[in-house]
Image (spheres, grey):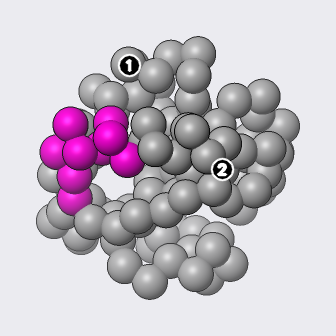
Amino acid sequence: MVTELTKSTFDKEIKNSKIPVVVDFWASWCGPCQMLKPVFEKVSKDYKGKALFAKVNVEKETELAEEYMVQGIPCLIVFSKGTEVDRWSGYASEDGLKTNIDCALKKA
């Protein structure tokens, strides 16, 4: 399950999570974001109990995008105990996304 985060829920969800959180910063007009959406949702099921998956719409949550210096989208940031441990931008295939997440989880 992928959770939609807002400015009011972001800190609570990220800082209170006992497991790492993978956050996809995206926008509706972004082609690569739309391509990543089904891959992100599918991969989230493979990490149940290992990581939470969340999304931030940068059109609606511009403050969060600025706060985390999101320069290009899709931008995925992995947080552990409220701290950023890894990030990458652009579309990734299912295997590529899993590889990136696995590397990030080792740092968490």
Q: Amino acid at mark 2?
A: Phe
Any part of residue 96 in sight? yes
Residue at (52% x, 46% y) in the render:
104
Residue 62 drawn above or below residue 57: below
Is residue 23 magenta-colored? no
Any part of residue 54 in sight? no
Residue at (58% x, 81% y) in the render:
69
The one of 79 and 24 positioned closer to us in this rendering: 79
Q: Which residues are magenta?
A: 91-100
Give how far across and how far down residue 40 sits, in percent.
32, 39
Q: Which mark is residue 79?
A: 2
Query: Callout 1: few (<14), some (14-19), or many (20+) C-alpha neighbours within 10 Å?
Result: few
Residue 80 drawn above or below residue 60: above
Give how far across and how far down residue 103 sits, in percent.
46, 44
Residue at (45% x, 73% y) in the render:
59
Which residue in the structure is indicated by mark 1?
46
Q: Main secondary structure of the magenta part?
A: helix
Q: CA distance from mark 1 to mark 2?
A: 18 Å
The one of 54 and 107 positioned closer to us in this rendering: 107
Give the secondary structure at mark 1: helix
In the rendered image, which quarter contains the C terminus?
top right
Q: Amino acid at mark 1?
A: Asp
Q: Which mark is residue 29?
A: none
Left/right placement of residue 89 relative to residue 15 reads left
Query: Callout 2: few (<14), some (14-19), or many (20+) C-alpha neighbours within 10 Å?
Result: many
Is residue 93 magenta-colored? yes
**Labels 1 and 2: the sequence-earlier one:** 1
